[in-house]
Amino acid sequence: GTAPYTYAWSNSQTTEDLSGLVAGTYTCTVTDALSCTSTVLATVSQPAQILVTIADVTLNCFTPSGTLEASVTGGVPPYQYLWSNGETTNPPQIQLPGIYGLTVTDAIGCTVGSSAYVLVDANAPIACTGPNQILTCALTQIVLDGSCSSIGANFFYVWQGPGINSGNFDNLTPTVDLPGTYTITVTNTVNGCSSTDIVTVVQDNNTPTISAPSDLALPCGGGAITLPGIGMGGPNIIFQWTTLGGNIISGANTLNPIVDEPGTYTILVVNTANGCTATASVTVNGGGVLCSTIEGRVLQDTVKNCLTDAGEPPLSGWIIKAQGTQGSYYALTDANGDYQISVESGGTYAVSAIATSVLWEACPTIPNVVATNPNETYTANDLLFQKLAGCPLLTVDISSGNLRRCFDTNHFSVSYCNNGTATAENAYVDVTLDPLFTPLSSTLPYMDLGGGVLRFLVGSIEVGECGNFGITAHLSCDAVLGQTHCTEAHIYPDIPCIPTDPLWSGASLQISSQCQSDSLRFTIKNVGTGNMANTVEYVVVEDQVMLMTAPLQLNAGQEITVSVPANGSTWRLEVEQVAYHPGHSAPAVSVEGCTTGSSFSRGFVTMFPADDADEFVDIDCRQNTASSDPNDKQAFPKGYGAAHYILPGTPLEYQIQFQNTGNDTAFTVRILDTLSTWLDPATIRPGASNHPYSWDLGGAGVLSFLFEHILLPDSNVNEPASHGFVKFTIHPRADAPLETVVENTAEIYFDFNDAIVTNTTFHRLGENFVAVGLWQPQQSGYEVLVSPNPFSDAAWLEVKGLRQNSPLHLQVFDLQGKLQMEMDSESAIFQLKKGGLLGGIYLFKIEQGGVTIGNGKLMIQD
């Protein structure tokens, strides 16, 4: 044809090309310039719709990554892919969860969109091992407790640790018998995820120590002997003595029982905290001990020539000691200065007299006596003493029976003596009653000085003379049951006769206290005439926990105040007296009942000694009671804690109480106290009683009190008058080792009746036994346990309440802030070893992840 051309489509379009057509049949008539025409037929077909299918994918610990694979149909291949994360491949690699979108474009430009979910199942199971555990002598195997972990058929467990083997590694609760760190791994078999936890098993096989001499002998003439067991103490330690046949010979937890029959005795000591035990045995021989008698006399050498001259006065009531290889034996001089001591035959004995005060000086003599033959009497040289100075030396003692609230029958007895070398002129005793007492009567007139102070004028007291008087008082009904009441007796003149040490600075420390509305204030003052030459330490104790120690140094007249909260705790402040201070002052004040509330702690005052070591002052502190054993023995101080710890050298005051509960008057009462071998009979000082008595000392340390013509009514006739008591003071032996248990029991005889045996008191000698205020958390919820504390070799420190498993860091400092020890722990437990550290108080700090979670104090013993 001839151009140009025209086009006529069946859809009325006139262009050469058509677009956007739908499927169907189209005709087109083409006409050229000469009007020639031609008609054509065209068919347009529609491809299938593009379909995209993508399966969702779940990632887990087995497959932490995966692929998203799109299945495409329809359209016109080839296809182009564009994923929402920018990927253009099919399938793409994916590692993150989320919604993934996809756009598919075919060859002719058709597009379609789709999407898929990528999920993650990474939930870890719970791995839990329970609390840390301890292997002991009683518990040699423990069960690791993984039962708090995830439990189900799709969980698998694997333990690792020193006690794990092929037989128990996959047990949820395996039994192990070795200390160490144990790890449990819990795996979810569905998603492959796992978790771990650790538990620490420590070994506590701390075996208690016990020892006893291999052989002992009953004293001369039979009698009893104390079995001197020596063992470690503590609230978890118990003792039990038995005979060879297994018969128990003493009550539970008696370390030093008294026996009067020969045989083999065995002591078993048990640490109830871990079940560890130890034993020791002693053989007591008897029946073959033969006795001799040593006699002599003690005189005052008035001529001062260290020779016995006619008319020289006797010294009565002096303790005599005969010391030999077979043991030590004791006696008391009578009114004529004479004595007789029964000793084991075949020995050489050094005989000495114990002066009643430092104002006497012994003349040189040949003290040794050879007691060769049994049943013979040997005479020792006269023991002569001269006065060092003519000076009175007054002693005083005050005590009471059981104190009862709301009763008018509370009785105090005061005894006094002149143990000096000159008459005491115009002597008097000031008695300071507890504020809750009201005096009702007394056997000696007094002047009321106010403030609870009563003055009793006793006049002149000759050398060696003693006296006594009594006070009856009402105890207020406002007193709380178990409250402690302290009463003080001070005898004057109290001026020391011995010149003061020239090294004494003249400083003298004194403590006072004042309970205020919100606080209790202690004041430490230098009441002396000189400045302190050196620093001393003071200690603050709350109930039975040492809260702080600090140094002080005061000039004359200077004072410091230490304030503590009025929270109802029993507070005690004690301070070292300055060096070379005259006398035996040990300043200490305990305050009970200072509180802003309605209740307060009780029973802690009498754990510690009072400041009454000087002979001219005595402080009697005791708790009131509702009822009590009519015949018992009490000891003051009662000692710290359940073990009744006291410092070596602490004088002990024993009070024996008795009551006639029979049906007739008792005419004579005799008390027999066979002293523990760890008590020093040479230090006995008889004290106050509410009835006149005489006393004696014999054997290896048998103390007796005799109340003749006491005419004690029975309790049915006159209950208040049916009671009696007597007190004495004695020191532990200077050579008694630490951890020695000092026990004491008495026998009470009413007329010709069998003995009533009192309870057994006990004390343990120790140092650094006051618990230290241990833990001050810096993050809430954390606690620390240190066992033992104090410790002498090793201790375990465990942190409780941890909220994460990251390692702990421990630092230990001395009181000067110098780092002494540091260590890390993957668990919550540290084992501390003394190593080269000296005994004393140390500070510690615990950190986790660089953050301090708490600090506290440790006590180490040498």
Image (cartoon, rainbow, N blue to C red):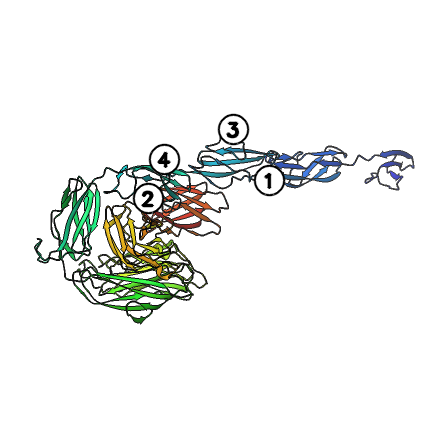
Mark 2 vs mark 1: which is more N-terminal? 1
Residue ID for mark 4: 245
Q: Are discs 2 and 4 less than 8 Å apart at CB?
A: no
Q: How far, Cα to Cα, is label 1 from label 3?
A: 29 Å
Residue 346: give x, y in percent of width and height. Answer: 17, 39
Taking the image as shown, residue 117 lies to the left or right of residue 637, namely right
Mark 4: secondary structure? loop
Quadrant of the rendering where the N terminus is positioned: top right
Circle 3: residue type: Gly
Query: In what element is the residue under mark 2?
Result: loop
Few, some or many C-alpha atoms within 10 Å of disc 4 (few <14, some 14-19, many ≥20)?
few
Label annotation for residue 123: 1
Q: Would you say the residues marked 1 and 3 are in contact, meaning their CB atoms lie under 8 Å apart?
A: no
| One can see residue 508 in this view | no
823 lies left or right of 443: right
Residue identifier under label 3: 167
Q: Quadrant of residue 628?
A: bottom left
Which callout, 2 or 4, points to the residue nearer the camera?
A: 4
Q: Which amino acid is tagged 1?
A: Asn
First-in-chain label (3 vs 4): 3
Query: What's the distance in space between the residues labelled 2 and 1, CA to CA?
Result: 66 Å
The image quarter containing residue 516 is bottom left
- Dots 4 and 1: beta carbons under 8 Å? no
Q: Which residue is mark 2?
A: 257
Question: Which numbered mark, 4 or 1, is in the foreground of this view?
Answer: 4
